[in-house]
Image (cartoon, rainbow, N blue to C red):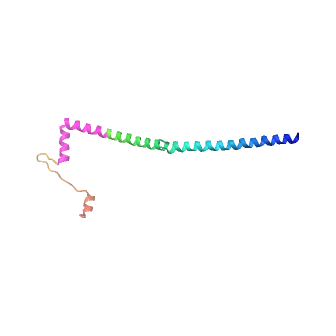
């Protein structure tokens, strides 16, 4: 009877060892599977890294749009001034085309730095 008990205990122990080995194998397979999923989520075509890059690009485009909208508003204001403000038209013509009023003389003064660069000091 003692022998039989020893065999039963030994078989139960052997059975537990098999269950532990089976559990460890299944656990490792699950870990590998989860690891592959994490890698795919991070580095895949639509992964987190791709999403991060796309968000950064979207923010850059949004900033560019904001800058262009501001520039557009400035141009619209300038168009309105050119349509309605005669003094502004005159000042722009003077700047852009170098136009003068009658009996007007322009004096051009060189800056000290410009003279030094030309060697006239």
Query: How far from the left and from the top, in percent, is residue 92?
Result: 20, 43
Is 29 rendered above or below residue 121?
A: above
Residue at 35% over, 39% down: 65
Q: Main secondary structure of the magenta part?
A: helix
Q: Is 92 within the magenta?
A: yes
Q: Position of residue 116 (x, y in %)?
A: 27, 62
Using residue 58 as the reference point, say whether residue 71 is left or right of it. left
The residue nearer to you, when weighing 40 against 9, is 9
Magenta stretch: includes residue 82: yes
> Residue 23 lies in what quarter of the image?
top right
Q: Report the magenta residues as a range.
A: 70-97
Q: Residue at x 65, y 42 (%)?
A: 27
Residue at figure coordinates x 17%, y 47% from the top left: 97
| Residue 69, position as x, y percentages in the image | 32, 38
Percent position of residue 74, x then y: 28, 39
Depicted 114 relative to depicted 90: above or below: below
Q: Is residue 31 left or right of residue 98?
A: right
In front: 115, or 92? 92
């Amino acid at each position: 009877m003692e022998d039989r008990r020893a065999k039963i205990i030994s078989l139960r122990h052997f059975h537990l060892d098999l269950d532990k080995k089976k559990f460890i194998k299944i656990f490792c397979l699950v870990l590998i599977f989860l690891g592959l999923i994490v890698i795919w989520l991070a580095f895949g075509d639509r992964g987190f890294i791709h999403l991060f890059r796309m968000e950064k690009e979207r923010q850059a485009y949004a900033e560019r749009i904001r800058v262009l909208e501001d520039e557009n508003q400035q141009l619209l204001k300038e168009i309105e001034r050119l349509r309605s403000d005669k003094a502004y038209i005159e000042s722009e013509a003077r700047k852009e085309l170098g136009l003068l009023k009658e009996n007007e003389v322009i004096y051009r003064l060189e800056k000290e730095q410009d003279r030094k660069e030309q060697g006239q000091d």
